[in-house]
Amino acid sequence: MRPYSTTRRPITSERIGRALDRVAEIVAQGDQGEALRPLYDYLDGAMQDLRTKDKRLAAVRERFTRSKG
């Protein structure tokens, strides 16, 4: 596992996806997994929010392109 980094990196769907994969692995293994389910739910919501924002931005750009063409 990589040590904590103080470098700010953008939040991307890839990073959220890796976090979801890791939390899912821990939750599926049992033991303390149930305690991390809220974290999984939070990350899943963050992924959905990011995808929604990306789709909205794509729609805005498409409208702009149409208006210029």
Image (cartoon, grey):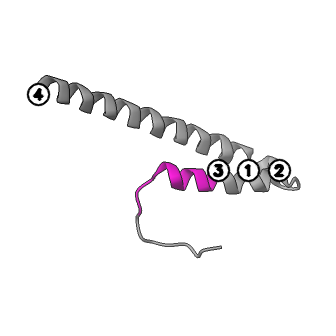
Question: Which is more N-terminal, label 1 or label 4?
Answer: 1
Q: Quadrant of the N terminus?
A: bottom right
Mark 4 and mark 3 lie on one chain; the one further toward the N terminus is 3
14 inside magenta stretch:
yes
The residue indicated by pointer 3 is: 20
Question: Which residue, given by chain and number where applicable, does mark 1 sit on?
Answer: 24
In the image, taking residue 15 as reference, residue 57 lies left or right, namely: left
Determine the main secondary structure of the stretch shown in magenta. Answer: helix
Q: Position of residue 8 (x, y in %)?
A: 40, 65
The residue mark sitting in front, 4 or 3, is: 4
Marks 3 and 1 sit apart, C-alpha to C-alpha, by: 6 Å
For the residue carrying disc 1, how many other residues have a C-alpha within 10 Å: few (<14), some (14-19), or many (20+)? Answer: some
Q: Which residue is mark 2?
A: 28
Residue type at tag 1: Ala
Q: Residue at x 74, y 44 (%)?
A: 37
Q: Mark 4 is on which residue type?
A: Lys
Task: Mark 2 or mark 3: name the one nearer the start of the chain.
Answer: 3
Callouts 4 and 3 close, C-beta under 8 Å: no
Residue type, label 2: Ala
Label 2, label 3: how many angstroms apart (C-alpha)?
12 Å
Find out whether the residues at labels 3 and 1 contact each other: C-beta distance under 8 Å.
Answer: yes
Counting from the top left corner in percent of width and height, residue 6 is at 45, 72
Magenta segment: 9-19
- Mark 4–mark 1 contact, CB under 8 Å? no
Distance from label 4 to label 1 (Cα)? 45 Å
Question: Looking at numbered disc 3 in the image, what kind of residue is underneath it?
Answer: Leu
Are circles 2 and 1 on residues that touch, CB within 8 Å?
Answer: yes
Label 4 secondary element: helix
Q: Rounded to the nearest whole Å, what is the CA distance between mark 2 and mark 1?
A: 6 Å
